[in-house]
Image (cartoon, grey):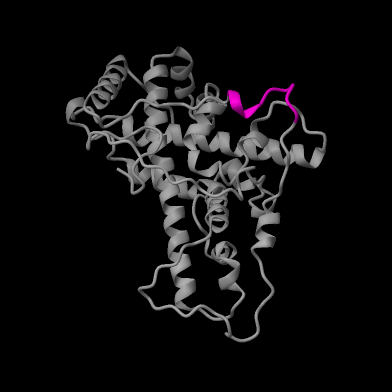
Amino acid sequence: MAIKLTTGDISRIIDLLNMSYENGKLAKPDFPSTVGQNLGVNFEEPRYTPMQEYIDSNTPAPAEGQEGRLKISPIDALQTPTVCLRISRAVEWIHHGLPDELVRTCLPAEVKKYSGYGYDVEAHEGSIQTNVRNVSNRTIDRAFVLGAWYFQKNISQKGLLTAFSSKKVKDYIEYIMGPIKPEHILFLFKDSWDAVSFPFLFHEGVRKKATEEAIRVELKRYITITAGVLVYDIFRFCLQIPSKIPAENYDIRAGRDKVAANYRMMPTWGPLSEVNKGIGRLPASARFDMKERVTKSKKTSSNVKTSNLPDAEGW
């Protein structure tokens, strides 16, 4: 179905975005530079480390009996290893959630070598599920930031209006994908790049091994389409203001749940459904086995969302 935007529609969207920036409901994006990523064709191709190497190292031989298993109660806190959290972020990156059949893959080796479901499994499952949920929520929040920036910049462009006059959603998405650059994707999926290798995907050279190049091309297209659909969904669910509602009375975040629901379902649609979603073949980040640094965030006004790390629980 074609999207018809009148001059009045465009004016109202621009007014809405300007007001949202002014009142702190939207943050201006702070896109990270990709200069230090060494993506140019003249740089050496990034190493390909299949995620399976980390999955295998986190997969122990089964233990006989329960001797040696940590005895904990429901109120005891356990710290889930960084490698497990990063495996779960890789799962979220490709599945946009945590499928039941992959929960055990993310559990610590010291827990899953034992049979049976105990409080230790419950504690780590809770930590991993919270981690995945927070990554998804922050991705949706950054999609708002990216989408608002994109449409403020492009809403009046003739090319966009022509693309939106098409009856095919595919045409909308492909047009939106055009101006999306690596730094936008680096920003949008910020939480995932300590798990999945951004340089592997966006290095500009053709890889020496055809099998690795096929993986790179497929996954790069996958994440670029995902970004394009997210930006489109921000327009579709959050920027089309009903004609009877003044722009100043419209809640730009009212459609957030629909954006999030579509994000969860996206891997099962169209060309994204055809992508091999095996976790083991994903390119692991060079930072995968590094310890996470804990940093204190700077204080900001209570009604302003920072563009690089939105509220983990969503808006």
**Horizontal side, residue 110 vs residue 145: left or right:** right
Residue 41 counted in the magenta span: yes
Say if residue 169 shows up in the picture.
no
The secondary structure that most of the magenta stretch takes on is loop
* Placement of the N terminus among the 4 image quadrants: top left
Say if residue 109 shows up in the picture.
yes
Q: Position of residue 3 (x, y in %)?
A: 40, 26
Q: Position of residue 52 (x, y in %)?
A: 69, 55
* Quadrant position of residue 151: top left
Residue at x-position 65% and y-position 59%: 55
The total of numbered circles placed on residues is: 0
Residue 167 counted in the magenta span: no
Residue in front for this viewpoint, 286 or 239:
286
Residue at x-position 23% and y-position 34%: 301
**Horizontal side, residue 131 vs residue 82: left or right:** left
* Quadrant position of residue 249: top left
* Placement of the C terminus among the 4 image quadrants: top left
**Horizontal side, residue 273 vs residue 70: left or right:** right
Residue at x-position 49% and y-position 15%: 159
Residue in front for this viewpoint, 240 or 37:
37
Q: Position of residue 211 (x, y in %)?
A: 79, 42
- 40 in relation to 68, above or below: above
Q: Position of residue 218 (x, y in %)?
A: 67, 39
Residue stretch in magenta: 35-44
